[in-house]
């Protein structure tokens, strides 16, 4: 993962998001999205972005196309010079570009606790809020893992965990699941304290100037994304 300074990461994401929201022509927006895709490839979150496009954004595109291309009249399109179909694609592409910029900014931090800790420290957030953020990030994956273990244990004991009988016995999963989650939370707090994940010292980026090589790469990509806004490409 690129060792990008936290503030450089935030500025690049803010500039690319602003560029996506400021475009007034479809070619300019396509150009910005291509810059965001380049950033997504550089930070190795292309697989996550493709899953987002396939599972969430494509159904949204279908709904927008039906609304603006079929249901509503041409006179009701908010942007002059756009047909209903063009406005649907324009709106969808703007949302996808903003989502890709946010994914490129935050998803790599989830893979590295040290960089995430440095990112939180650069924001100078209170330690209690940092604990809340980290706990929220690991909560759902931890619930899935613990629930899988409880279900496997019930299945090994000969109980049905599917169908109507499994639905009736589902309340019996709550007690071992909650107990397991509490035990896991205690162990995680001890591990975080031992590794100083939430310490106030920020050693990951200590002595690293913002205008470092990788940071300049991020900012140059952001500047390239803003280029169509300044040149006013025609629609």
Image (cartoon, helix red, strand yellow):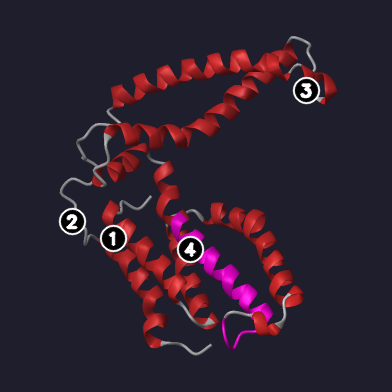
| Residue 88 counted in the magenta span | yes
Residue lying farthest to the top in this orientation: 157
**For the residue labelled by badge 1, is the local secondary structure a helix, a strand or a loop?**
helix
Question: What residue did someone put label 3 on?
Answer: 167
- Number of the front mark, 2 or 4: 4
First in residue order: circle 2 vs circle 4: 4
First in residue order: circle 2 vs circle 3: 3
First in residue order: circle 2 vs circle 1: 2
- The residue at the point 64 percent across, 24 percent down is 148
- The residue at the point 56 percent across, 53 percent down is 47
**For the residue labelled by badge 3, is the local secondary structure a helix, a strand or a loop?**
helix
Disc 1 vs disc 3: Cβ atoms closer than 8 Å? no
Residue 57 occupies quadrant:
bottom right
Residue 209: image tag: 2
Question: What residue did someone put label 4 on?
Answer: 98
Residue lying farthest to the left in this orientation: 207
């Amino acid at each position: 993962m690129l060792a990008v300074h936290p503030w450089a990461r935030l500025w690049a994401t803010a500039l690319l998001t602003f560029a996506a929201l400021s475009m007034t022509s479809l070619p300019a927006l396509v150009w910005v999205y291509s810059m965001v895709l380049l950033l997504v490839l550089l930070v190795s979150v292309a697989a996550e972005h493709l899953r987002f496009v396939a599972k969430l954004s494509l159904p949204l595109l279908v709904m927008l196309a039906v609304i603006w291309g079929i249901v509503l009249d041409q006179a009701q399109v908010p942007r002059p010079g756009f047909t209903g179909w063009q406005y649907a694609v324009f709106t969808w592409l703007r949302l996808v570009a903003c989502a890709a910029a946010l994914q490129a900014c935050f998803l790599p931090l989830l893979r590295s606790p040290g960089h995430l800790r440095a990112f939180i420290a650069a924001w100078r957030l209170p330690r209690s809020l940092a604990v809340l953020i980290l706990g929220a990030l690991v909560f759902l994956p931890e619930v899935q893992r613990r629930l899988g273990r409880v279900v496997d244990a019930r299945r090994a004991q000969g109980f049905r965990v599917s169908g109507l009988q499994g639905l009736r016995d589902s309340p019996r999963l709550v007690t071992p699941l909650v107990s397991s989650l509490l035990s896991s939370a205690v162990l995680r707090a001890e591990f975080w304290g031992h590794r100083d994940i939430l310490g106030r010292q920020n050693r990951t980026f200590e002595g690293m100037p913002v205008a470092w090589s990788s940071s300049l790469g991020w900012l140059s990509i952001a500047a390239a994304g803003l280029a169509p806004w300044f040149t006013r490409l025609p629609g």
